[in-house]
Image (cartoon, grey):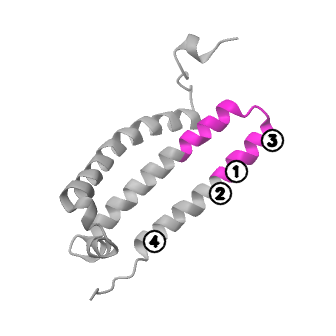
Amino acid sequence: MTYLSETGGRPRPGAGFALWSWFFMRISGLILIFLVLFHLFWMHLYIGLDNITFETIVNRWTGPLGAFWRMYDLIMLVFAFTHGMNGVRWVIEDYVRQPGWRLALISTLVVVYVVVLLAGIYIIFAFPVVELE
């Protein structure tokens, strides 16, 4: 039996969905580093934690750069959530040995992924453009 510690970790997949999933994790991780660092800089240092309110988000999404910020938040949501759910799928495939349980867990994961991602997209794009007093 070959253990992960003997091979130096998870081997690189050969082809198909597993290979594209493997590439996605590396590329999305790299992109997320820059997206999250800019988000942290902008929200926590430039705006300041004490100044982040509902009004701040409304002004950000409805102001002159509203379309940019909505797309930025959408891209960060899609990359981060897909990256995380793909990692959970890998854990399920690594540790759940029974095919029935594996299918049930991955199917549940896909349903949760679709519902939460659609809810996030809906919130970003259906956010009402209102004037605050």
- Is label 1 or label 4 in front? 4
* Mark drawn on residue 100: 3
Up-down: is 82 above or below 99?
Answer: below
Disc 1 designates what residue? 107
Among numbered discs 1 and 4, the one appearing first in the sequence: 1
What is the C-alpha distance between the residues marked 2 and 3? 17 Å
Say which element carries label 2: helix
| The magenta segment | 85-109
**Disc 1 residue type (three-letter):** Ser
**3D distance between C-alphas at marks 1 and 3:** 11 Å
Quick check: is 20 in the magenta stretch?
A: no
Q: Quick check: 62 above or below 114?
A: below
Left or right, residue 125 beside residue 66 = right
Q: Measure how far apart labels 1 and 4 are at the Cα level.
A: 24 Å
| Residue at image location 33% in from the left, 86% down from the top | 130
The answer to which of marks 2 and 3 sits earlier in the sequence is 3
Determine whether label 3 and label 4 are within 8 Å by CB: no
Q: Which of 87 and 58 is in front in this view?
A: 58
Q: Which residue is drawn at 52% across and 60% down?
A: 117
Calculate the distance from the C-alpha at mark 4 to the C-alpha at mark 2: 18 Å
Other-residue count near label 1 (Cα within 10 Å), few / some / many at <14 / 14–19 / ≥20:
few
Instruction: Identify the disc placed on residue 123.
Output: 4
Q: What residue is at 38 percent from the left and 56 percent from the top? A: 75
Across and down, in percent, residue 30 comes to 35, 38
* Rendered location of residue 101, percent (x, y): 78, 41
- Within 10 Å of disc 4 (Cα), the crowding (few <14, some 14-19, many 20+) is few
Give SS at disc 3.
helix
